[in-house]
Amino acid sequence: MDAQHDIPLVETDADPADVLQNTFGYHEFRPGQERIIDHLMSGEHVLAVMPTGGGKSLCYQIPAILSDGVTVVVSPLVALMDDQVAALRANGVNAVSIHSSMGRDDQVDAWNDVQAGRAKIVYLSPERLMTVRMLDALSGLSVSMFVIDEAHCVSKWGVSFRPEYEMLSRLKERFPQTTFGAFTATADEATRQDIERKLFPGEGTTIVQGFDRPNLRLAVGPKDNWRRQLTAFLEDKDGQSGIVYCLSRKYTEEVAAFLNGEGHNAIAYHAGQDAELRKRNQDRFMSESAVVMVATIAFGMGIDKPDIRFVCHLNLPGSVEAYYQEIGRAGRDGAPAETLMLYGLDDIRMRRMFIDQDGEDDAHKLREHKRLDSLLAYCEAATCRRKVLLAYFDEETGPCGNCDNCLNPPKRIDGTRHAQMILSAVYRTGQVFGAAHVIDVVRGAETAKIFERGHDQLPTFGVGKDFSKQYWQAFVRQMVAGGILSINIQKYGCLEITEEGGEILRGKRDFEFREIRETAKAGRKKKRAGPASDLSAADDELLTKLKALRLDLAREKNVPAYVVFPDATLIEMAQVRPVDLDALADINGVGPKKLSEYGAVFLGVIAGDAG
């Protein structure tokens, strides 16, 4: 890029490594930090894209400490400002924030510290910074650097655009000699170009440190029974902190109540709560261990808890960027962490509806639909998920070995005939019905809706009766994600055939899909749900002994009996009669922790019964 004002931020003999060690207590920089610091110290504008937990704050705090003037940090959240200031003061750096939640006297004292040069760093919201009064006041000082944190908020191309952030584009004209640093963890190429254009057109350097977070295990699955799936995901995570993201406020309350009933320490968090309750809940999450925060996306920005061990999405996020940002809150200490996203057709419909209701800008809506398409492609990927995720951000990598597709590769099989069944049903019913009715037609369901419309007379009625409703739901999801069918929000979520779908229907192209293992799951589920009365007399006798053992263990731990094992698990033990730990691990409801804690004693009862 073109050279700019060429005014160094600090003297060239200043040593950032000294500040790193003597102020912050770190012995070496993380990857990319030193390069960004060098650019800023030389007076060069920088847009830095760094993965969450990559240490971006130090990249501007060290140059700010070494500079002669004041550094203004623009931050989107009051809580984030106060946390950053508290962390700097804990390291002996005098920093202040000025915001509306502070009392008048505190604001005056903070500004006096800035004006007198006692505070090297001041945190402001974009709204406060861009007032005439604040800009005039700063013009009378030596402002060495403006730092725009969460810089993706500047761009209309980004997923978290905030109009008040766009006002920052006027800063360059007002402060032409000041260095600009912009930082974000989430920005694709279009967003990066827009940020540059608004903050320092043609005059800066963009440094993309990389998006890979190899310590995060990635997994995605179809949502069929969120309670069972969430319980299974959390089974080996006792004593760990994590976040469960939900789409609605009501859902967060429901999920938190369920988890508390299952013995977890869960807290709900959403924008509908009053500010004081939200603050208390956030403080609990930050200070206590083994807390599960069940939240909407109102929770997360600026959360710097290093030991979050898992992030679970119970609904589809809005885009790849949003998903990446949200899972990025896990494992910031570099230790292994797990992620899981569950989604269904309803999630796709809701996301499409949110986009279509978002203002009048058709170009913006088209971009957001395309972003959602990219997320769906990630969800239905049959190859390494990390490879697909990083490719979205123009970064290449080989198979990671740490995602569900690498660890348990899905089988891709020809689904052309099944796709034609669905497409034919969609076409013959007029492309005006949602997935539920179309699946009912294919399965030959005898519903009033089908008989009233004469759909039982269609050639496609019942052609897919050999497969369950869950199977067809998963299959249609893949057709939607693959662009074979589209969901028309204006027509209440009806399925419509795309151009590619028309070619498949006419036999001009094939359709491959990920193997759906629902049939085997359904069989296990049925077995688990089987009543004890189906057991033989001998098995029933063993079940009684297993329940007695369970009751003793539950009393010892002062927990309900089902916390040890639910009835369905004991029933399956009585039927299968596992002979060793490996066989016991195959029983539904026996996770690694319970296997370790209870396996030997339950095997002892089973072996004693056999003897």
Image (tube, helix red, strand yellow):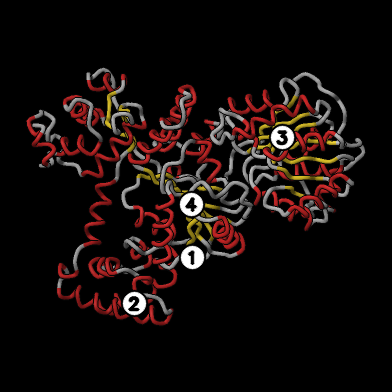
Q: Nearer the viewer, mark 3 or mark 1?
A: 3
- Circles 4 and 2 in contact, beta carbons < 8 Å: no
Q: Is residue 561 above or below residue 106?
A: below
Label 4 vs 1, first from the N-terminus? 1
Could you tell me the amino acid type at mark 2? Arg
Identified at 78% across, 34% down, the residue is 135
Secondary element under disc 2, as helix, strand or loop, is: helix
* Quarter of the image where one finds residue 449: top left
**Rendered location of residue 155, percent (x, y):** 60, 29
In the rendered structure, which amino acid carries the disc numbered 4?
Gly
Comes first in the chain, label 3 or label 2 = 3
Q: Quadrant of the C terminus?
A: bottom left
Gap in angstroms between the C-alphas marked 4 and 1 = 21 Å
Q: Which residue is mark 4?
A: 272
Q: Amino acid at mark 1?
A: Asn
Look at the picture and state if 194 lies above or below 137: above
Q: Is residue 255 above or below residue 600?
A: above
The residues tagged by marks 4 and 2 sit, at their Cα atoms, a distance apart of 41 Å
Q: Which residue lies under the disc numbered 2?
A: 550
Say which of 33 and 164 sits in front: 164
- The amino acid beneath tag 3 is Met
